[in-house]
Amino acid sequence: MRAAVLAVDRDALASDVPPFAEQGYDFPIVSSPIVLYELKGVAPEITTGIEGAVAEIVAEPEFAEFVTAKGTLPLYRTGAEIKAAVRAMQNAVTSVINALKSN
């Protein structure tokens, strides 16, 4: 049995372990993002302010050390970027589920 990372690229925390794709497996990439949601109707300037504050926090070296010690890497995405990423993960998993249903 070979180890593999569920990712597109090698993980910085386990760079010696190749991802599934590198080993020839077509596997949907699904991560576990931490997502902050806002209520409908929030003023755009509040959203922009919160996104800016979170981006600053994620950019701090102390934050990177903290989350790296917990086994993950710091990554910041805007609301639009995370929405697209979650939609892509949903689509990848849905195609696998539909393929399994048809077998």
Image: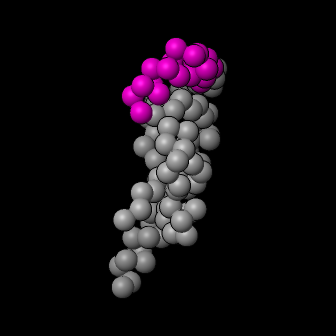
**Of residues 22 and 83, the one drawn nearer to the viewer in this rendering:** 22
Residue 62 at x, y = what percent? 52, 14
| 61 within the magenta span | yes
Question: Residue visible at 41% across and 33% down?
Answer: 71
Magenta residues? 51-71
Question: Residue visible at 62% across and 41% down?
Answer: 81
Q: Main secondary structure of the magenta part?
A: helix
**Of residues 86 and 60, the one drawn nearer to the viewer in this rendering:** 60
Residue 27 at x, y = what percent? 49, 65
**Of residues 83 and 39, the one drawn nearer to the viewer in this rendering:** 83
Question: Residue visible at 47% across and 70% down?
Answer: 95
Question: Residue visible at 44% across and 66% down?
Answer: 94
Residue 70 at x, y = what percent? 39, 28
Q: Quadrant of residue 66?
A: top left
**Of residues 22 and 67, the one drawn nearer to the viewer in this rendering:** 22
The correct choice, above or below, for 18 with respect to 38 in the image is: below
Quadrant of the drawing holding the C terminus:
bottom left
Answer with left or right where residue 79 lies relative to residue 39: right
The correct choice, above or below, for 62 with respect to 16 in the image is: above
| 22 within the magenta span | no
